[in-house]
Image (cartoon, rainbow, N blue to C red):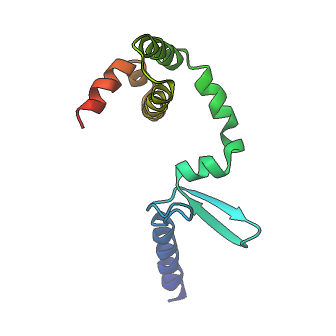
Amino acid sequence: MSSINTNTMNIKDSIAEECQNCWTCDKPNATNKEYRDALGEYEWTCTECHREEYPEQYEEERLIVINDKFMMGECSEFTRKMLENGMNINTICGIIKEYQRKYLYIKSQDKELAKTFTMEMWWICRDRK
């Protein structure tokens, strides 16, 4: 009987872990768990907040992004064209950041598909919202 209770607790614990809210922004389904000595417990954060709070863990990822010639080429070309057309540099940076996030997500799911995800394709898709 105690094994049933233990299994039940393990199932409840795993369900509870899957449904944690981010402790920073309170969004549901936090994906990262870090032990905090000051708190004496684990802290749950969403990916965005985790990147903000633990940037050193993503340093290698940044280098990979910078070395992605396809994405950097798309961003450079877009920047050049938009500056020629008089778009504000801050607006351009925001647009590029949004594209890069989408591109990197697609690349994490399917590297071959990412090679077809151009800035132009993303621009057209985002206008269809």
Give whichever of 122, 89 is nearer the camera: 89
Task: Note whether residue 102 is visible.
Answer: yes
Query: Along the horizontal axis of the image, is 125 left or right of 30?
Result: left
Number of numbered discs visible in the structure rendering:
0
Determine whether 50 is above or below 80 in the image: below
Please report the residue visible at 56 percent of the width from the left and 61 percent of the height from the top. Answer: 24
Give whichever of 43, 9 is nearer the camera: 43
Give whichever of 24, 87 is nearer the camera: 87
Residue 107: x and y in percent read 46, 29
Determine whether 98 is above or below 47 in the image: above
Q: Which corner quadrant holds the C terminus?
A: top left
Please report the residue visible at 47 percent of the width from the left and 76 percent of the height from the top. Answer: 12
Residue 29: x and y in percent read 45, 60
Residue 62: x and y in percent read 63, 31
Query: Along the horizontal axis of the image, is 30 left or right of 118?
Result: right
Residue farthest to the right, as pictured: 37
Determine whether 18 is above or below 115 in the image: below
Query: Along the horizontal axis of the image, is 16 left or right of 50?
Result: left
Please report the residue visible at 54 percent of the width from the left and 81 percent of the height from the top. Answer: 6
| Quadrant in the rendering for residue 37 | bottom right
Residue farthest to the bottom, as pictured: 1
| Quadrant in the rendering for residue 122 | top left
Task: Note whether residue 118 is visible.
Answer: no
